[in-house]
Image (tube, helix red, strand yellow):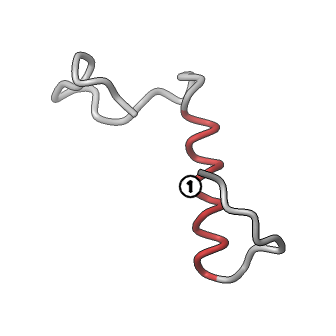
Amino acid sequence: MIDEDHLTEDYIIPSVFDRQVVPQVAKAVMNAALRTGVARTSKKVE
């Protein structure tokens, strides 16, 4: 998620205020729920 231009020793985790974080985390959580069988739907998010 972090562009190579912004990746430094002090900045390896994106800010929670970065608008790209929430959708990426939501997608990862949904896919993990599907993979582990705890999801109530079978729709995978790409």
Q: Residue furthest bottom?
A: 37
Q: Position of residue 11 (x, y in %)?
A: 28, 27
Instruction: Report x, y in % for residue 12.
Output: 28, 34
**Quadrant where the N terminus lies?**
top left
Residue visible at 34% across and 29% down in the picture? 2
Report x, y in % for residue 21. 55, 34
In percent of the image, x 75 and y 64: which residue is there?
43
Check the image and name the residue furthest to the top: 5
Image-based side of 18 in relation to 33, left or right: left
For badge 1, the amino acid type reads Ala
Name the side, left or right, on which 20 lies relative to 9. right
Give the image quarter of residue 38: bottom right
Q: Residue at x 65, y 54 (%)?
A: 45
Relative to the observer, which residue lies in front, 38 or 15? 38
**Secondary element type, mark 1:** helix
Q: Is residue 12 above or below residue 26?
A: above
Tell me if 1 is positioned left or right of 39 in this view: left
Residue at the disc numbered 1: 28
